[in-house]
Image (spheres, rainbow, N blue to C red):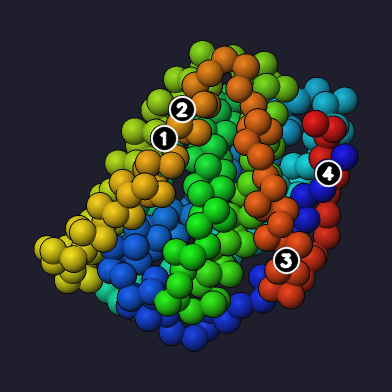
C-alpha cells in the first residue's frame, strides 16, 4: 500500500512576486505563469472528475477507491489554493488570464458527458503534468537565480503530481474506459492544452513588453529544444500514453519520493489516504 499525503506548503505568497521571477528570464517566467494560470480552474475540474467517477462506481469499488480519491482531491485542492495566491500576485504585472475563460467555455461542451469521459480528460492532462513534473525534478538547476520560495512551490507541486498520477487513470479503467476513448481524448487534449499554453505564454510576453525581444526567443529555443530542453525530453514519455497496455505507474516516481523526503521542512503533513495496491 502507498499513501497520498495532503501537505500544507510553508512559503510566503503574500510578498510581491518580481516581474521576471524565474531567474530574470522573461520567456521562462511567461511560460510558467501561463501554466499557473491554468491550474486553479483545471485542478477544480480534476477534483470534480474524480468525485463524479467515484460516485459512478459500484459500492464495492467505491470503497476500494474512496481513500485514494480523497487524497487526490486534498492534494489538488492545495495546489489550487497555492496557485490562486501566486496568480493574484502576477496579475499585478498587468497579465490577463485568457486560458481560464476559454476552459470555462469548453467545459459547457462536456458538462453532460458521462464521468468516464471527464476522467479520460483528467487522466490525459495528469499524464502531461506527471511527465513535466519528472522533467522539472530532474532539472532543479533551472531555478538558479530564482527565489527559493518559487523553486519550492514548483518542485512541491511536481512531486505531488508524480505521486497521484495513477488515480484518475485507475478510476477510468474501473468504469470500463476503453483504450480507444483514452487515446481519442489524449489526442484532443494534447492539441487543446499545448495550443492554450502557447497562446497564454505569448499573451504574457506581449503584456510584459518582451514578446519581440531577440533574447526572449533565444531563451525559448534553448529551453524548449536544447539537449535537456522541455520538448526534447518530454516527447518520448508523452507518446508512451498512446500505447495499448500503458499505465502511469510505468513512469518511475523516485525523484518525487526523494524530493519529498529531503524537503520535509517545506511543508506540514495534513493527513494521508491509503491507495489501492499497485
List x then y, in percent, for residue 267.
72, 71
Question: Tag 1 or tag 3, which sits nearer the N-term?
Answer: 1
Per the image, label 3 sits on a secondary structure element best described as helix
Q: Which mark is residue 239?
A: 2
Rendered residue at 55%/53% (across/down): 138
Give the Cα distance between marks 4 and 2. 27 Å
Circle 4 residue: 2
List x then y, in percent, for residue 217.
20, 58
Per the image, label 4 sits on a secondary structure element best described as loop
Question: Tag 3 or tag 2, which sits nearer the N-term?
Answer: 2
Residue 262 vertical placement versus 76 (above, below): below
Looking at the image, which residue sits at the far bottom?
A: 15
Residue 173 vertical placement versus 131 (above, below): above
Circle 3 residue: 262
Tell me if I can see residue 120 in this picture. Answer: yes
- Residue count near mark 1 (Cα–Cα under 10 Å), binned few <14, some 14–19, many ≥20: few
Give the Cα distance between marks 2 and 1. 6 Å
Rendered residue at 62%/17% (across/down): 245
Give the Cα distance between marks 4 and 1. 29 Å
Question: Tag 1 or tag 4, which sits nearer the N-term?
Answer: 4
Report the front residue among 247 and 257: 257
Give the Cα distance between marks 3 and 1. 29 Å
Q: Quadrant of the N terminus?
A: top right
> Does the CB distance between marks 3 and 4 fall below 8 Å?
no
- Residue count near mark 4 (Cα–Cα under 10 Å), binned few <14, some 14–19, many ≥20: few
Amino acid at each position: 500500500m502507498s499513501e497520498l499525503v495532503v501537505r500544507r506548503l510553508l512559503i510566503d505568497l503574500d510578498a510581491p512576486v518580481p516581474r521576471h521571477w524565474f531567474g530574470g528570464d522573461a520567456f521562462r517566467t511567461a511560460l510558467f505563469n501561463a501554466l499557473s494560470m491554468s491550474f486553479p480552474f483545471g485542478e477544480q475540474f480534476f477534483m470534480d472528475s474524480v468525485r463524479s467517477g467515484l460516485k459512478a462506481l459500484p459500492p464495492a469499488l467505491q470503497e476500494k477507491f474512496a481513500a485514494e480519491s480523497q487524497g487526490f482531491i486534498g492534494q489538488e485542492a492545495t495546489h489550487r489554493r497555492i496557485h490562486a495566491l501566486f496568480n493574484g500576485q502576477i496579475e499585478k504585472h498587468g497579465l490577463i488570464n485568457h486560458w481560464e475563460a476559454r476552459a470555462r467555455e469548453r467545459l459547457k461542451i462536456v458538462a453532460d458527458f458521462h464521468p468516464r469521459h471527464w476522467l479520460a480528460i483528467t487522466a490525459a492532462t495528469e499524464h502531461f503534468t506527471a511527465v513535466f513534473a519528472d522533467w522539472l525534478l530532474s532539472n532543479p538547476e533551472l531555478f538558479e537565480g530564482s527565489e527559493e520560495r518559487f523553486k519550492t512551490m514548483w518542485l512541491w507541486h511536481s512531486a505531488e503530481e508524480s505521486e497521484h498520477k495513477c488515480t484518475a487513470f485507475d478510476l477510468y479503467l474501473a468504469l470500463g474506459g476503453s483504450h480507444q476513448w483514452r487515446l481519442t481524448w489524449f489526442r484532443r487534449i494534447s492539441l487543446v492544452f499545448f495550443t492554450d499554453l502557447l497562446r497564454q505564454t505569448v499573451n504574457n510576453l506581449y503584456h510584459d513588453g518582451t514578446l519581440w525581444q531577440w533574447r526572449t526567443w533565444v531563451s525559448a529555443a534553448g529551453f524548449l529544444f536544447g539537449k535537456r530542453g522541455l520538448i526534447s525530453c518530454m516527447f518520448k514519455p508523452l507518446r508512451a500514453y498512446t500505447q495499448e497496455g500503458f499505465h502511469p505507474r510505468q513512469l518511475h516516481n523516485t525523484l518525487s519520493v526523494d524530493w519529498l523526503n529531503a524537503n520535509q521542512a517545506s511543508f506540514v503533513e495534513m493527513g494521508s489516504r491509503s491507495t489501492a495496491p499497485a
